[in-house]
Amino acid sequence: MIVRILNEGQWQLPEGALSDLNRLDDAVEEAVSTDDEAELASALHALLDEVRTKGTRVPDDELSDSELILPGADSTLDDIRELLSTSDEGLVPN
């Protein structure tokens, strides 16, 4: 699975990584639902770090379609809320 982190690039993740991403995505959604900016920063950092550590960076000169697009590390509560409003499944589909 190819995952893009906005403003950073793409990572190739093994298929088994999706369940861990879903768990971390739940924490992001919870932080947004409670308007907790500090918790959002922590949860988003954990989600993105999971992608970076479990994935293999795709070279910038390779063109690959992303199966999943995640917000950048500097995204605000409003940015994430807007992204979540377009999906019933959060940032990471179940």
Image (cartoon, rainbow, N blue to C red):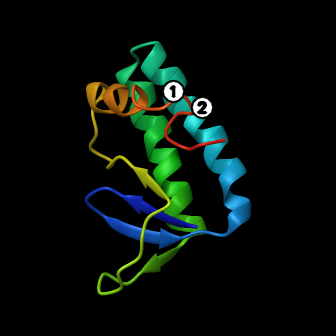
Quarter of the N terminus within the rendering: bottom right
Query: Dot 2, crowdedness within 10 Å: few (<14), some or many (≥20)?
Result: some
Q: Position of residue 45 (x, y in %)?
A: 44, 46
- Residue at which label 2 appears: 26
Label 1 crowd (10 A; few <14 / some 14-19 / many >=20): many
Whole-percent x, y for residue 48 in the image:
46, 52
Q: Is residue 30 above or below residue 66?
A: above
- Give residue 51's position: percent from left, percent from top: 53, 60
Alpha carbon distance from label 1 to label 2: 5 Å
Please state which amino acid type lies under the numbered disc 1: Glu
Question: On the image, which quarter does residue 58 sit in?
Answer: bottom left
Residue furthest to the top in view is 34
Residue at x 42% of width, y 30% of height: 84
- Give residue 35's position: percent from left, percent from top: 39, 14
Q: Quadrant of the C terminus?
A: top right
Q: Could you say which quadrant of the image residue 60 lies in?
A: bottom left
Q: What residue is shown at x 46% (from left), y 12% (from top)?
A: 34
Residues at circles 1 and 2 in contact by the CB criterion of under 8 Å: yes
Vertical position of residue 16 compared to residue 47: above or below: below
Disc number at residue 45?
none
Q: Give SS at disc 2.
A: helix
Which secondary structure lies at badge 1? helix
**76 relative position to 5: left or right:** left
Residue to which mark 1 is pinned: 29
Q: Is residue 82 above or below residue 10?
A: above
Residue displayed at 40% across by 61% down: 4
Between residue 21 and residue 69, name the one nearer to us: 69
Count how many numbered circles sit on residues in the image. Answer: 2
Q: Amino acid at mark 2?
A: Asp
